Amino acid sequence: MNLANMAWRNLWRRRRRTLITGFTVGFGVMLAVTFTGTGDYMYTNMINASAASGLGHVTVEPRGYNHTPTLDKRLTNSTGIRQRLLSLPEVTDAIVRITGQAMFASATKTVGGMFMAIDPAQESPEHNLLLRSLVEGGVFSGTTGRGAVVGERLAEKLNLALGKKLVYTTTDANGEIVSEIARVSGIFRTGVDEVDGAMALLPIDRVRETLNYGPDDATLVAVMITDQRRAGRVRDVMTRMVGSPEREVLSWHQTQADLAGLITVDASANYISQALVGLLIAAGILNTLLMGVLERTREFGVMMAVGMSPGRLFRLVLMESFWLGLVGLGLGVLMTTPWYLYLYHVGLDFSGMLAGQDYSAAGVLVDPLMRIRLFKESVAVILVGVFLLALVSGIYPAWRAGRIPPVESLRTI
Amino acid sequence: MKPLNANEPPHEHIVRLEDVSKIYQQGKIQVRAVDNLSLDIDTGDFCALCGPSGSGKTTVLNLIGGLDVPTQGKVFLENQDLGDLNGAEIARIRRDRIGFVFQAYNLIPVMTAYENAEFVLKLQGRPERECRDRVMAILTEVGLAGLEHRRPDEMSGGQQQRVAIARAIVTQPAVVLADEPTANVDSATADSLLDLMQRLNREDGVTFLFSSHDQRVMDRARRLIRLRDGRLGSDEVRP
């Protein structure tokens, strides 16, 4: 009989204990999938929502603009840059925009805020959160008109409604104060106060004219990519492609540093929780295997007496932990699959706990519906991680089994 | 049955102990389990170590089997000083040259009779076919033909001890060390086990060294070594 076969039979000598430990490992898989999957889903949603708020997953902008976003800094030949970036396979969209600070005024009030000048022909609701969140009216047509789409809270502050006039004042490319009139064509509500209370969309060519920009000038090209996790790599490729002393390419980690920090802290706490759960599982496996070793001390003594080497005995017990890991993974897959499918298709709705309020973090609305999405890499990490955990947990009992002198083992009853 | 090591010349003294002592520390007290013992066991012996409890019988078997190391003196097996060997070499000697039979059978519970008997051959890395032929032959020889698929908990004490004997002799060892092999079985079973071991000794030349205070074992032994307080009391060879 080979070691694997023997280890398998040994595992089932204490069927109940093996099953309890197997279910513990399975429960660990379920927790790891839940923690990781909800994290993968939530972080991706937040990052994509943040990207759709204006800057994209990767941004091409004038050097220094990210640190000091003044309108005297601008990209020239933005259309050419956009066209080149669209040729990259990982880029799903590239959008030329002008963003800046402005004072918005109506007949009754003045409020400070931000504008984003766009070409509606380049925009889509998928990649523009504000257009996706329209609650009244619609986006202006063309790029030279005097339309404006404003946030719901900004409209409330300025007593604006569809068709009402809005005056925006800002500094132009030369640092001169300039103003322009617009008429509200639409109102959006994202649920994020700092966006709804301060943002307005304006036609890009009208803004270029107001700012004394050239016909192809802009402050940024927002680039959307297929997978936010590859933003750093895509940024490097884009830097080689369009980088220059005057312009830089930044990933969302750099342009949305608050969000990146929040996700890092949250993910770290998540990993620590998983590590603690892993420790508990490892303790369970170690306990099961160690008990199995200690109660078979005499049997191991006999095996060594008839010529089994300590190394072979070590491998036997390690093989038992290998099987225990596999059994645990199997049970884990069985336990986790229905739970995963439920979270994937239905999710857990926590909106009731927020009493109807929207909850945002780092300028991004957090979805109160907890759903799950597990990246393939995460699946591999969880399965390999749990399996390695089982193997590592078996090392001490295996070492212990091989170290007991046979003569002492044989004295054990 | 053809010996596995047929090409090796027989050693006149399979086992030799030279001024061997074994001292155990029990708390603050030193116990001298074996005290300056010297003796030889010859090829083909059917020899019993006897004496009261605590006389050092099992300790001597453990020293000869390389399961324990002497505090002083030397133990030779086939002229090889066991003190010169490292752990792996001792394990190899136990695997290839020594057979063990224990009082409590000590079969591996997850294995069948066949697999228990085959265990040491597998450790030696013998080919599958050779294992099968040898194990089936040995199980037939010890009277277990037809029971090879039973696990230990499906067999009587006597049957389990026969499996243990089969496991001990299947590799054709230089010596079989049997520690109280009849202590856990009834009289009839003990007699039949002794018949079996006597036959294996007589017909196949297997060397047996027993530790026992069972009168039946002592009656059948051709050589009777009496131990008293770890020392040699008497050494009687019978015709």
Image: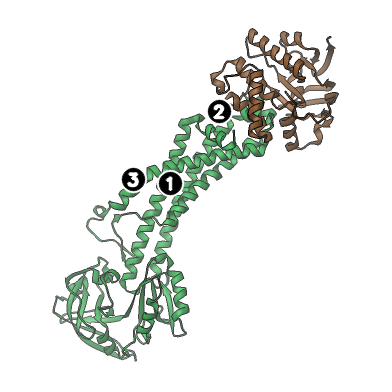
Chain colours: A green, B brown
- Along the viewing direction, whichever of A286 and B120 lies nearer the viewer: B120
Helix, strand or loop status at disc 1 = helix
Say what amino acid the circle numbered 2 marks. Val
Give the label on residue A180, or none: none
- Label 1, on which residue? A29
Please state the chain letter of the residue tagged with numbered disc 2 in the rendered image: B
User: Residue sitting at 71 percent across and 16 percent down?
Assistant: B197
| Relative side of B55 to A69, left or right | right
On the rendered image, what quadrant is the C terminus of chain A found in?
top right
- Label 3, on which residue? A338
What crowding class fits label 1: few (fewer than 14 Cα within 10 Å), some (14-19), or many (20 or more)? many
Q: Is residue A339 above or below residue A320?
A: below
Residues flagged by tags 2 and 3 on a common chain? no
Say what amino acid the circle numbered 3 marks. Pro
Say what amino acid the circle numbered 1 marks. Val
Given contact means CB atoms under 8 Å apart, are the residues at marks 2 and 1 in contact? no
- Label 2, on which residue? B110
Q: Which of marks 2 and 3 is in front?
A: 2
Q: Look at the image and tell me whether residue A347 can be seen.
A: no
Q: Position of residue B137 (x, y in %)?
A: 66, 22
Residues flagged by tags 1 and 3 on a common chain? yes
| Relative side of B190 to B209, left or right | left
